[in-house]
């Protein structure tokens, strides 16, 4: 790649008139969204507006059907791409509710993940020692208890520990496109600060972040370049970071009213 | 067919070795008469013991009593858990093979069947079960062990029951273990071998734990898919004893283990764990009873199953707390992971409590691989097959992680899980 990037090769994600249904019920009703490298986007919206559906469908979760429109990632249509392939190509979803995997050691899980992604990039699997060293660096970034990596994934973790584990994985896997689904829910202020620091440390000119959130709070810590408001499956308003503050102050009813009054 | 089998047994019984001791001959005769009277169990409504397991595929064969055979030790090492550091004792088709067995010489006394008049059969009631009666009537050979408190606890007693898989042979080994006061031991009892021919191993195991004795016991069924393996285990615990027994099932076409632990002492603990992994058209039936007859003791019954193909598993787990057994603490659970639409488990945990001051709980679950768990792993780049494998191993790990002997643990992971067909999801 050349040193000077033009807009064309900065383009990471292009969502074009995306319609998505679950069990024949349409949830997303024509989403258009463009994300470039180096940008932080926030999707805000009331409960049931389709925020999490958008995050899930971008990461390839089964159970959602794209009825029309397209998701282009790095110039390729990935509508039909398997979730593991998307992950290996650099799409990462930090879960709203990280899943507990009884009997699956966190260490084994993380190593399998790192190795799968390395393999995609034509790199060799890491040795045990190399991986341990790598893991320690990223674990320290989010102040995650070292005992947790010996335990089953997320099993018996507190809410905060689970979210830290998500951000630790973000840091460890170093994706190109990070989707954070309600990452702030269930976090106290200290944990929110640690998690936000993790994300801020991660973001760079060679990746992009999309935060899905109900509340503005996390956006005090992670400053978005763009804020989109999702209501009933449509992005009804986009703006810069100030839009989030305005929403916090006036509430989602304000947006709904301003749409119905045609403003 | 069953008639044919029974009349064949008549002939076979008469032609058994007549040079045996008088007491053994009369024991066999009594057992044989009992078998003739009660017959083989029939699965039908009302017969809780055999409700979900049909014995007709077994007794429709006319089995002939096995004969002693030689075996290459390398074949055994390939098929059974093994360490050269252990005491390895090998039965071939129901007969101890002394050439390849390494019988310990201290801290333990080992005697043969003919010299065990006072101990053998003490804990079993063959009028209770046709297969136990069959074992007693046709006892081929047995290992009668008494473990003293001077036994080197770093040594594992590895008892292998190898089935050569000779077409239509049946063998009836007996294992009788007495753990003397204050003794401590690790015992592996494994059933391996088999071929593509039908054969039957019909074993009886008796274990007696005298006061303050501790046994850590592993029981493995890892035979080929054409064998039948019926086992009958009876255990009695005295005061201050600890009995840890883990049962692992992977092989046999039809497998059955009927285990009854009588907690006949105070301050004792009985811990029974199990993992059954079934595939193809296998059938495994665990029929487990813990009988609390004395106060202040505890028990834990924890089984897990992984079922695929058209296989079927039965879990009948009963904890009985008798009136005298106050302050009993007992938990039991059976959890199943079902990997195909056509696999089936009948799980029936039960508690019968006649004492009023006890703490008991039980439960059973059956479910498929969790889709959210799979997606979580896939979203980290791990493909479907690897994700399901990690989850299946994770499920089994809750039982396998208790195995402390490395060689045994590796054996179980290799033989039990790596042979599983890869799991296909349908979303």
Image (tube, coloured by chain):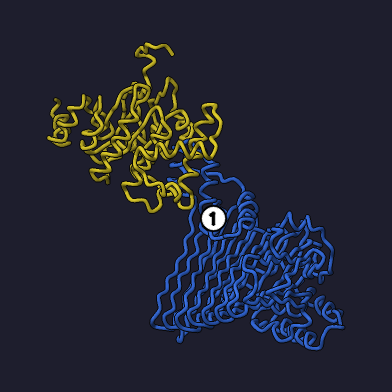
Choose top left, top right, bottom left or bottom right for residue A139: top left
**Percent from the top left, x then y, of residue B419?**
64, 50
- Direction from residue B63 to residue B400 in the image, left or right: left
SS for callout 1 = helix
Q: Quadrant of residue A51?
A: top left
Name the residue beneath numbered marker 1. B396
- Which residue is nearer to you in this view: B86 or B285? B86
Q: Which quadrant would the N terminus of chain B be assigned to in this image? A: bottom right
Residue at the spot x=70%, y=72% of the render?
A: B203
Chain in yellow, by letter, is A
One can see residue B355 in this view:
yes
- Mark 1 Cα shell of 10 Å, populated few (<14), some (14-19), many (≥20): many
The image shows residue B254, relative to residue B385, as above or below, that is below
What residue sits 54% from the left and 74% below the top?
Answer: B242
Can residue B62 be seen?
Answer: no
Q: Is B210 located above or below residue A59 in the figure?
A: below
Number of labels in the image equals 1
Q: Which residue is drawn at 51% across and 57% down?
A: B398
The x and y percentages for residue B76 are: 75, 58
Give the side of residue A149 with respect to residue B139, left or right: left
Residue B64 in the figure: left or right of residue A62: right
Name which quarter of the figure residue A68 lies in. top left
Q: The blue chain is which one?
A: B
Residue at the image point whose x is 22% and y is 25% from the top: A238
State which chain disc 1 sits on.
B
Of the pair B145 and B261, the residue shown nearer to us: B145
Location of residue A213 with respect to B239 vertically, above or below: above
Residue A211 at x, y percent in the picture: 30, 33
Q: Where is residue A199 in the image (x, y as percent from the top left)?
A: 32, 33
């Amino acid at each position: 790649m050349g040193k000077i990037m033009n807009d064309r090769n900065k383009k990471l994600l292009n969502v074009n008139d995306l319609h998505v249904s679950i069990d024949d019920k349409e949830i997303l009703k024509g989403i258009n969204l463009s994300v470039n490298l180096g940008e932080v986007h926030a999707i805000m919206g009331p409960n049931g507006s389709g925020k999490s559906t958008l995050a899930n469908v971008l990461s390839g979760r089964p159970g959602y059907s794209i009825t029309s429109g397209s998701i282009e990632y790095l110039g390729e249509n990935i509508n039909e791409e398997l979730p593991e392939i998307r992950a290996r190509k650099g799409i990462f979803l930090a879960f709203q509710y990280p899943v507990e995997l009884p009997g699956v050691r966190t260490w084994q899980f993380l190593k399998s993940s790192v190795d799968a992604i390395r393999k995609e990039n034509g790199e060799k699997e890491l040795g045990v020692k190399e991986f341990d060293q790598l893991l320690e660096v990223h674990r320290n970034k989010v102040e995650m208890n070292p005992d947790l990596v010996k335990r089953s994934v997320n099993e018996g973790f507190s809410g905060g520990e689970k979210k830290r584990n998500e951000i630790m994985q973000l840091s460890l896997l170093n994706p190109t496109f990070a989707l954070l689904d309600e990452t702030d829910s269930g976090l106290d202020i200290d944990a929110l600060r640690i998690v936000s620091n993790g994300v801020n440390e991660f973001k760079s000119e060679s990746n992009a972040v999309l935060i899905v959130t109900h509340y503005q709070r996390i956006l005090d810590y992670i400053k978005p370049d763009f804020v989109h408001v999702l209501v009933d499956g449509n992005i009804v308003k986009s703006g810069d970071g100030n839009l989030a503050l305005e929403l916090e102050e006036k509430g989602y009813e304000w947006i709904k009213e301003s749409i119905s009054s045609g403003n | 067919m069953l008639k044919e089998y029974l009349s064949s047994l008549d002939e076979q019984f008469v032609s058994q070795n007549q040079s045996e001791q008088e007491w053994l001959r009369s024991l066999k005769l009594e057992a044989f008469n009992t078998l003739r009277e009660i017959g083989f169990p029939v699965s039908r409504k009302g017969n809780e013991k055999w409700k979900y397991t049909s014995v007709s595929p077994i007794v429709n064969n006319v089995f002939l009593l096995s004969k002693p055979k030689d075996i290459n030790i390398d074949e055994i090492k390939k098929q059974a858990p093994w360490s050269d550091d252990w005491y390895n004792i090998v039965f071939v088709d129901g007969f101890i093979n002394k050439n390849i067995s390494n019988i310990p010489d201290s801290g333990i006394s080992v005697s043969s069947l003919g010299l065990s008049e006072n101990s053998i059969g003490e804990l079993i009631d063959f009028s209770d079960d046709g297969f136990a009666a069959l074992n007693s009537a046709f006892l081929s050979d047995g290992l009668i062990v008494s473990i003293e408190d001077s036994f080197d606890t770093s040594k594992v007693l590895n008892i292998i029951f190898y089935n050569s898989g000779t077409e239509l042979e049946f063998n009836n080994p007996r294992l009788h273990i007495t753990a003397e006061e204050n003794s401590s031991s690790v015992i592996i009892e494994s059933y391996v071998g088999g071929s593509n021919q039908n054969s039957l191993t019909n074993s009886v195991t008796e274990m007696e734990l005298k006061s303050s004795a501790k046994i850590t016991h592993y029981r493995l069924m890892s035979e080929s898919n054409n064998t039948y393996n019926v086992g009958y285990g009876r255990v009695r615990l005295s005061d201050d004893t600890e009995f840890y027994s883990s049962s692992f099932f992977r092989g046999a076409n039809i497998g059955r283990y009927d285990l009854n632990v009588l907690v006949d002492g105070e301050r004792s603990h009985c811990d029974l764990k199990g993992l059954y992994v079934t595939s193809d058209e296998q059938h495994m039936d665990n029929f487990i009873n813990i009988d609390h007859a004395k106060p202040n003791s505890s028990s834990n019954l924890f089984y897990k199953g992984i079922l695929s193909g058209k296989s079927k598993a039965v879990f009948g787990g009963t904890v009985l707390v008798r009136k005298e057994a106050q302050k009993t603490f007992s938990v039991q659970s059976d959890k199943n992971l079902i990997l195909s639409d056509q696999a089936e488990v009948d799980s029936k945990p039960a508690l019968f409590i006649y004492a009023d001051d006890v703490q008991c709980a039980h439960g059973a679950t059956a479910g498929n691989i969790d889709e959210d768990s799979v997606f979580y792993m896939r979203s980290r780049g791990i493909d479907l097959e690897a994700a399901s494998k990690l989850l299946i191993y994770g499920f089994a790990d809750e039982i396998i992680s208790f195995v402390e002997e490395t060689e045994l643990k590796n054996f179980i992971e290799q033989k039990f899980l790596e042979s599983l067909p890869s799991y296909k999801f349908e979303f």
